[in-house]
Amino acid sequence: MAGQVLLALSAFPDAETANHIAHTLVAEKLAACANIIPAVHSIYRWKEKIETAGEVIVFFKTTQDRQKAFQDKLRSLHPYELPEIIYVKIDKGLPDYLRWVAEGCAS
């Protein structure tokens, strides 16, 4: 079961947008939960310029089975032209928690 769970990360321009999108993804069972980290300072290159921005990071827990649907929905809702969507495969964790994530994403 542990191999099925993914941690997905995405950055958003503000807490309101992050909250709305996270709520939608959890309500549609594309993610079991979302942890919103409200204040990060990002420095990045975009279109050959160095940019800085205050952003909000969200850690989503999802599954490999729901990855495509999760990504498609997140991309459709995300305000950025090129949203950050990064996945980390969870190899180990509390079995009951990993089972809860899988159940929370079951369609």
Image: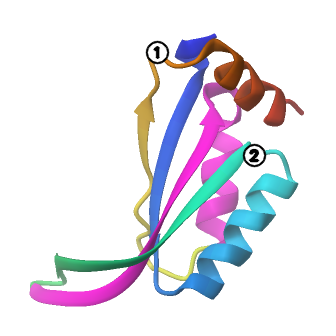
Above or below for 86 versus 13: above
Camera-side residue: 25 or 74? 25
Q: Would you identify the image quadrant in which residue 15 lies?
A: bottom right
Q: Secondary structure at mark 2?
A: loop
The residue indicated by pointer 1 is: 92
Residue drawn at x 44%, y 79% as measured from the top left: 81
CB under 8 Å between discs 2 and 1: no
**What amino acid type is highlighted by mark number 2?**
Leu
Q: Which residues are magenta?
A: 49-77
Residue 89 percent across, percent down from the top left? 44, 27
Looking at the picture, the colour scheme in use is rainbow
- Amino acid beneath label 1: Lys
Q: Position of residue 25 (x, y in %)?
A: 75, 57
Residue for badge 2: 30
Figure check: 100 above or below 45: above
> SS class of the residue under badge 1?
loop
Q: Residue at x 40, y 62 (%)?
A: 84
Picture coordinates of residue 2, whole percent (x, y):
56, 14
Q: Nearer the viewer, mark 2 or mark 1?
A: 1
Q: Is residue 11 left or right of residue 40?
A: right
Which of the image's four quarters has the C terminus? top right
